[in-house]
Image (spheres, helix red, strand yellow):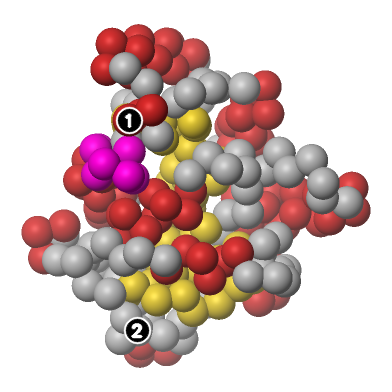
Amino acid sequence: MTRVAVEPVEGGLFVKPWIFIRGVPAMKFLPPEGPPEVAFAGRSNVGKSSLLNALVGRRGLARTSNTPGRTQELNYFVPDGYGGEGARLPPMALVDMPGYGFAKAPKAQVEAWTRLVFDYLRGRVTLKRVYLLIDSRHGVKKIDEEVMDLLDSAAVSYQVVLTKTDKIKPPAVSRLVEETRRAIARRPAAYPEVLATSAEKGMGIDDLRVAVARAVQDR
């Protein structure tokens, strides 16, 4: 497998336009392995689309993954000008996982999503890190802990990102960061640093960009 170099943040990776390239409903539809990937997971309504849009500086990009038929797929985004095959492989890819905890989804659909996600997490060599989004207004819930168990079991590095921190007071953000850090301290696959962000206010977005760049460059 060829290692694909990733531009540093200073090189403008997240300033360039990003585009949606494909939705993946099954493992056989995954793009060829090569460029490093980072994935984003979180409960429904955690603010994942807003955070992805803020990360790449393009409003409305992640809405593509919310169109009918794509909500239960792994959705791939890459910098514009790259494709998913051959010499046009991108320097990296962002993977938007479907939100979990959706109460109205049929059981069979949830089971299919769970199989797809676990197979992806367990078998994708180019996956460098999962960013697990937690709504700062609610903190870590049981279902989030179950996803952490899945990530630990798959031995996939993940980092907790608190979203919507502008909705709570600064002292509460600090307490939540520390509480979350303690909660994940003994988890084998958890990255120790917890990021606090607000897509609406732009808080912590640069920190997230740096974290993503380091995740794909350092491993």
User: Label for residue 82?
Assistant: 2
Disc 2 crowd rating (10 Å Cα; few below 14, some 14-19, many 20+) is: some
Comparing 9 with 140, the one in front is 140
Disc 1 crowd rating (10 Å Cα; few below 14, some 14-19, many 20+) is: some
Direction from residue 106 to residue 171 in the image, left or right:
left
Q: Relative to residue 172, is residue 160 depicted above or below? A: below
- Magenta residues (range): 198-204
- Give residue 73's position: percent from left, percent from top: 66, 64
- Give residue 169's position: percent from left, percent from top: 31, 17
User: Please, which residue is most extreme toward the bottom here?
Assistant: 87
Q: Is residue 7 magenta?
A: no
Q: Residue at x 37, y 21 (%)?
A: 168
Q: Residue at x 46, y 82 (%)?
A: 84
Comparing 167 with 150, the one in front is 167
Main SS, magenta residues: loop
- Give residue 53's position: percent from left, percent from top: 37, 59
Figure quadrant of residue 142 = top right
Direction from residue 44 to residue 15 in the image, left or right:
left
Mark 2 and mark 1 in contact? Answer it, CB < 8 Å. no
Comparing 118 with 19, the one in front is 19
Q: Earlier in the sequence, mark 2 or mark 1?
A: 2
- Amino acid at circle 2: Tyr
The reply to whether residue 181 is visible in this rendering is: no
Q: Residue at x 25, y 50 (%)?
A: 209
User: Label for residue 75?
Assistant: none
User: Label for residue 166?
Assistant: 1
